[in-house]
Amino acid sequence: MTSTHAFRADWYSPPGQTISDVLQHRKISHEEFANHMSLTSDELWRLLEGVVTITDELADRLSRELGSTPQFWLAREAQYRADRARLQKPAPTADEKQWLRELPISDMVRFGWLRAANSVSERVEACLQFFEVTSIEEWRSKAEVSAAFRTSPKFKSELGAVAAWLRQGEIQAATIQCARWDREKLKAVLPTLRTLTRKKEPVAFLPELTAKCAECGVAVVIVRAPKGCHTSGATRFISKHKALLMLSFRHLSDDQFWFTFFHEVGHLILHKTKSVFVEWEDVPSSKEEREANEYAANTLVHPDVREAMLALPSEAKAIVRFALQIQVSPGIVVGQLQHHGRLRYNQLNTLKRRFRWE
């Protein structure tokens, strides 16, 4: 039976301890050993206490006088320095502990965003690397990404989780090659993107969705929301010529997914490129959010056919026929009818496509 965990001592000892043990075993005095090594008494003390670093030349001399290989003595030195550095780290501060409590560490590790760590100090270091900051103070200043974001009533309670989600979106977006941002090109491709709502599985529509958006300068990324992050989507410009559109698939249904997608597209087309929009549940709508909602609704179900939609009987067959006629998924029509009060929220949900994380 073998263990997958490497042993990590909670102490450290300098190579001088091994030297002293060998000298004692061979009944060699410190003075005799110092003479053979051409060391003064002070130099010998510094070697035994670990003050002196064992160099290649010193490792050769130790090998000749005490045995073993030079590589052994160099490895003994390296292990001592590593253990000392690890164990002499200052105790975690209250601010560091508080910061880790604000972050969804378990999910960040589970989703593969963060490496597992054994100590508070290691977790802090891993999180600083993830966010690409040098201090918690720098993280706090960067996390407040816009005035609109800061004024959300959920900002304070969900800051850590949302910041982690947004950062993972940036990381994934960096791997997507995009053309230069082109608002008019994005508007022109919307009819094609709308037809993708008819495809049943994400594996069928996501590659084309991300490719078409990338041609317009938009990196579309799907990032699962960690615990404490109640967001469905977000948009921001990560450079002058590249937009980021994030989706969390939070509700795992096609009507919610596609409405959120076109809502975020609405932000990109209608609003300033310097703005950051994060969609939270149960947050009062701003003017920009209402405009993005209207844009999504009008894109999915054109105003010219909305009256006909609202006149549909509450029957699955009629809704499926209408969805086929306007070339969207039946789930989208059900979602719109529920929003307008023509259907109860527990009515005809079997027409919605459900997704799951794998």
Image (cartoon, rainbow, N blue to C red):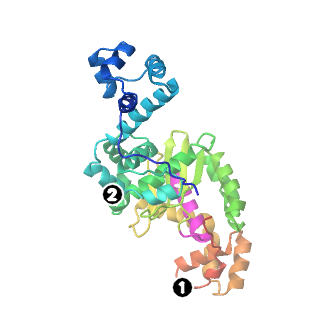
Counting from the top left corner in percent of width and height, residue 152 is at 35, 60
- Residue linked to disc 1: 344
Segment tinted magenta in the rendering: 251-271
Front residue (pair 47, 324):
47
Q: Give the residue type at disc 2.
A: Thr
Residue at horizontal 27 percent and vertical 50 percent from the top: 95
Look at the numbered disc 1 and give the secondary structure of its residue: loop
The CA span between labels 2 and 1 is 33 Å
Give the class, few, some or many, for how many residues have Cα within 10 Å of label 2's Cα (few <14, many ≥20).
few
Give the class, few, some or many, for how many residues have Cα within 10 Å of label 1's Cα (few <14, many ≥20).
some
Q: Earlier in the sequence, mark 2 or mark 1?
A: 2
Residue at horizontal 36 percent and vertical 19 percent from the top: 33
Front residue (pair 54, 27):
27
Q: Quadrant of residue 334?
A: bottom right
Residue 75: give its label: none
Residue at the farthest bottom position: 314
Residue at the farthest front position: 27
Front residue (pair 267, 256):
256
- Residue linked to disc 2: 151
Counting from the top left corner in percent of width and height, residue 51 is at 31, 25
Compared to residue 153, the image places residue 273 above or below, namely above
Magenta span: predominant SS is helix
